[in-house]
Image (spheres, rainbow, N blue to C red):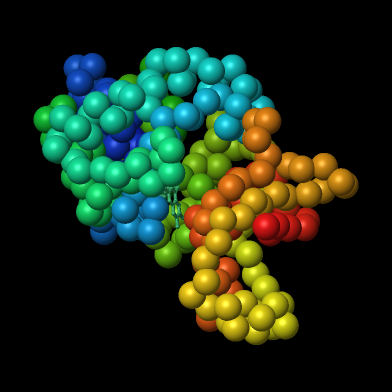
Amino acid sequence: MTYDVVVIGAGAAGLMCALTAGYGGRRVLVVDHANKAGKKILMSGGGRCNFTNLATAPANFFSGNPHFCISALKRYRPEHFVELVERHGVDYVEKAPGQLFCADSAKEILRVLLTECDWAGVDIRLQCSVEGVERRGEGMQVLTSLGRIETGAVVVACGGLSIPTMGATGFGYDIARQFGLAVTDTRPALVPFTLTSQWKARAAELAGVSCDIAVATIRDGRCLGPGRERRYREPMLFTHRGLSGPRHRLNGRRPRRSTPGG
Ligand SMILES: Cc1cc2nc3c(=O)[nH]c(=O)nc-3n(C[C@H](O)[C@H](O)[C@H](O)COP(=O)(O)OP(=O)(O)OC[C@H]3O[C@@H](n4cnc5c(N)ncnc54)[C@H](O)[C@@H]3O)c2cc1C
């Protein structure tokens, strides 16, 4: 088999990359060892996928190379993705200002990406495991359970390490190391609150009560978080099992002390 581009990983990143390369006239193959494309998309946003945030800005991202986010967001803005989902007739709602979710199901976002891949002539092979990637002359060779694939370029879109049951592996990091790229240490970025049994019992007494709160992660007396706004203001719900709310997973560096405050 010969392709111009082989994309490893049929998640949001891999599918978006594949359809863009396909529309650019490349022969594209996406391979994924999972039995279904975009599993993480389906579970995102509580099953309704928060597919963009209109206020997305470079300051919202941690990066060793902040210029990357600046140029990427200049070329592809949230409005571009909104225009795409509208073209596919996806109904959406604005939950908090600028925060857009599917009105029905995250399946709609996966449908958009797979339809676009189809229109762009992208081939997708699932349940295909990748055993290795090697340079071959001017191009590359991908060794898979379907056999050897010759290609001009390989895109590694294997995702991060979170939720291995959804197919996540460290394969992308292994390939990066194989080709001599520096790999930074990984650590959780989205961290759910865990409560002691004493606090869990207190929360259970309030089960069903919701209120607006501010959440901050504090280290050495400093609030951590991207941008100037280092506190997240969100509704929070007390449940029998603890606390529930979208922002009780903190985007930031590994928290040492999390303080929900009223
Ligand atoms: C609970 C939860 C809720 C979320 N909610 C939102 C939200 O509302 N909005 C939002 O923007 N983001 C959300 N996210 C984050 C978002 O889902 C991810 O950032 C995004 O899906 C990552 O896409 P990806 O393509 O980089 O990786 P992935 O979706 O992880 O895709 C990687 C693919 O590579 C495949 N793969 C891995 N290793 C191999 C291998 N060796 N060979 C072949 N294939 C391989 C995997 O099977 C997988 O299909 C949420 C995440 C979680 C966990």
Res 94 seen here: yes
Res 150 seen here: no
Question: Would residue 75 be found to the left or right of residue 248 on screen?
Answer: left
Residues 259 and 153: in front is: 259
**Residue furthest right in the image:** 220
Above or below — where is 148 with respect to 256?
Answer: above
Q: How many marks?
A: 0
Residue visible at 31% across and 23% down in the picture: 80
Residues 163 and 150: in front is: 163
Above or below — where is 254 with respect to 207?
Answer: above
Q: Residue 95: x and y, percent?
A: 38, 46
Q: Quadrant of the C terminus?
A: bottom right
Residue visible at 22% across and 54% down in the picture: 104
Q: Quadrant of residue 153?
A: top left
Question: Would residue 203 be found to the left or right of residue 89 on screen?
Answer: right
Above or below — where is 87 with respect to 196?
Answer: above
Q: Residue 118: x and y, percent?
A: 13, 35
Residue visible at 23% across and 17% down in the picture: 24
Residue visible at 38% across and 53% down in the picture: 44
Q: Quadrant of the N terminus?
A: top left
Q: Residue 127: x and y, percent?
A: 27, 55
Question: Would residue 152 be found to the left or right of residue 198 on screen?
Answer: left
Q: Quadrant of residue 115?
A: top left
Q: Residue 107: x and y, percent?
A: 23, 52
Residues 191 and 133: in front is: 191
